[in-house]
Image: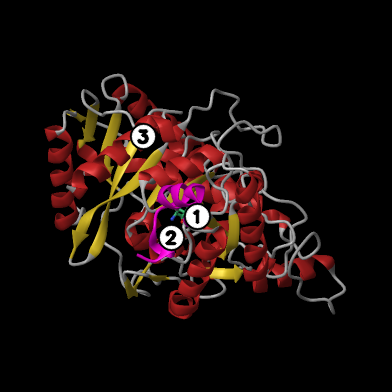
């Protein structure tokens, strides 16, 4: 197998044995980029020269010291929503097309400190708004499994890069499913940590009470390795949690016998692809055979989750995106216009894409004086009820199993003209963001060659259990 197709954990071991160099891995990744990137469009920016320099530095350090952090010398891709010092960060938008941050996001800072090799910035739906990576200024990312299909979104570039060998690991963000859903569509593993587990400092805000940074890798173990590097308290983010950080790579080694898994009946209903249901049923049977106790549970307010999510996410987005006015950063239009308000209007009109404008309008509407109680406040109340459902369920079970998506990856363009259809793809993922809970998608077989994702949901700050279950499942399904 080529180096670019191997898992991060395996590569880290080979690096320590001195059998391979970071330069070789990095060159292998760039060779793959040369072969596939024209079609896939997974990156907005690649930084080959600095990557090769970082690889050489890692190799130099390995010559002197074998006890480097596990990420040392491993190529990583970063979603273009995370600020990277001196490297253009567009968020998939024209309005930030020439924005070069002066600092690194904390998650980026931490992987670089560990010696990871930054390959580039990945494609995404503009400001994270979308489920297919079709809403990007540079056009859609294609699914590496079948390039007629979408890669999922909004971290589609990160998932496609990992799945295709254009990166070994990647960072994504997840506001309503954007790590888990593209991971499912591309056949990768992706984890959304508990809200507060990973610092949001330097992450361009979409919906601040929902956004989380997380790892995408080939396996649950790879996600654990990357999570070890990025998790932990950060004084620069007041919502980051000052709590104990376990060793996630140690956690995956534990047996899963005796754990209790909940199956929420509201997630196995009409609208779920029959083939996906069958695959999830098989996975559940396999877990049961390996000593997991299966319990039926109910998350009764699930049916409101998509509506509540799109009210709260758009409300927060309309406020967060008010800062783009052509003055502070990025693109400006209307330099010839004397009137400042008209300059703002021209800038925002030309700088934002259709979906972003739709959401700013919707968010402004639900926050407006006359409708605040009817929409925004009510959505916040139901958000609490959705969270209470999970709290109740977790009194009886250790984790919850659901499909990641109701459908298989769809054709490019298929849902673009119908935003409601696009929003429904998030039906199984948004509740976790509303509740702040961690969740991971792992590959659970294929249907006609297309990957299926299984979602494992955990208690707050219990990423250990979901990684452990994900890893155990990957091992037992290999057999
Ligand atoms: N698809 C969802 C949305 O468009 C989720 C996106 C995300 O998680 N960033 O809002």
Q: Is residue 375 visible?
A: no
Q: Which residue is mark 3?
A: 252
Viewer-side residue, 266 vs 98: 98
Give the vertical position of 14 relative to 351 (above or below).
Answer: above
Give the alpha-carbon distance from disc 1 to disc 3, as whole Å. 19 Å
Viewer-side residue, 13 vs 9: 13
Question: Label 1 neighbourhood size at 10 Å, few (<14), some (14-19), many (20+)?
Answer: many
Q: Which residue is located at x 35 percent, y 42 percent?
A: 304
Q: Which residue is mark 2?
A: 162
Q: Is mark 1 within 8 Å of ligand 1?
A: no
Which secondary structure class fits the magenta region best? Answer: helix
Q: Which residue is mark 1?
A: 170
Q: Which residue is located at x 56 percent, y 40 percent?
A: 229
Q: Quadrant of residue 325?
A: bottom right
CB within 8 Å, label 1 to label 2: yes
Give the alpha-carbon distance from disc 3 to disc 2, as whole Å. 21 Å
Of the two numbered discs 1 and 2 on the same chain, state the one appearing first in sequence. Answer: 2
Give the vertical position of 183 relative to 44 (above or below).
Answer: above
Residue 466 at x, y percent in the picture: 35, 35
Q: Which residue is located at x 33 percent, y 55 percent?
A: 184
Give the alpha-carbon distance from disc 1 to disc 2, as whole Å. 7 Å
């Amino acid at each position: 197998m080529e180096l670019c197709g191997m898992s991060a954990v395996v590569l880290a071991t080979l690096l320590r044995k001195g059998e391979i160099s970071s330069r070789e891995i990095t060159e292998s990744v760039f060779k793959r980029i040369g072969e596939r990137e024209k079609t896939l469009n997974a990156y907005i920016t690649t930084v080959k020269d600095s990557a090769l320099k970082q690889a050489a530095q890692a190799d130099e350090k390995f010559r002197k010291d074998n006890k480097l952090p596990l990420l040392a010398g491993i190529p990583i891709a970063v979603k273009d929503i995370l600020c990277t010092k001196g490297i253009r960060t567009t968020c998939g938008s024209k309005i930030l097309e020439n924005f070069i941050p002066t600092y690194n996001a904390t998650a980026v800072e931490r992987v670089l400190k560990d010696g990871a090799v930054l390959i580039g910035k990945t494609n995404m739906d503009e400001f994270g708004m979308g489920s297919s990576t079709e809403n990007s200024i540079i056009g859609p990312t294609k699914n590496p499994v079948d390039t007629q299909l979408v890669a999922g979104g909004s971290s589609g570039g990160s998932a496609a890069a990992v799945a295709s060998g254009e990166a070994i690991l990647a960072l994504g963000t997840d506001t309503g499913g954007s790590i888990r859903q593209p991971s499912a569509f591309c056949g990768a593993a992706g984890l959304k940590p508990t809200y507060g587990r990973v610092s949001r400092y330097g992450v361009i805000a979409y919906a601040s009470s929902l956004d989380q940074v997380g790892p995408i890798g080939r396996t649950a173990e790879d996600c654990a390795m990357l999570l070890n590097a990025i998790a932990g308290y950060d004084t620069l983010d007041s919502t980051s949690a000052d709590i104990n950080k376990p060793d996630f790579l140690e956690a995956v080694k534990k047996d899963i016998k005796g754990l209790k898994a909940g199956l929420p009946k509201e997630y196995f209903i009409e609208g779920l692809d029959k083939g996906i249901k069958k695959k999830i049923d098989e996975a559940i049977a396999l877990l049961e055979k390996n000593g997991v106790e299966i319990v039926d549970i109910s998350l009764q307010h699930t049916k409101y989750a998509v509506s509540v999510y799109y009210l709260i996410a758009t409300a927060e987005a309309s406020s967060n995106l008010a800062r783009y006015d052509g003055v502070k950063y990025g693109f400006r239009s209307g330099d010839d216009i004397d009137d400042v308000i008209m300059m703002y209007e021209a800038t925002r009109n030309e700088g934002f894409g259709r979906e972003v404008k739709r959401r700013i309008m919707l968010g402004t509407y639900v926050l407006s004086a006359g409708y605040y109680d009817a929409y925004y406040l009510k959505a916040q109340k139901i958000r609490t009820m959705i969270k209470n459902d999970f709290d109740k369920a977790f009194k009886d079970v250790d984790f919850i199993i659901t499909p990641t998506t109701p459908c298989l990856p769809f054709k490019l363009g298929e849902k673009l003209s119908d935003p409601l259809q696009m929003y429904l793809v998030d039906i199984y993922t948004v509740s976790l963001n509303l509740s702040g809970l961690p969740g991971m998608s792992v590959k659970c077989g294929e249907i006609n060659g297309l990957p299926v994702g299984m979602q494992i949901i955990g208690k707050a700050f219990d990423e250990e259990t979901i990684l452990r279950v994900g890893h155990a499942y990957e091992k037992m399904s290999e057999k």
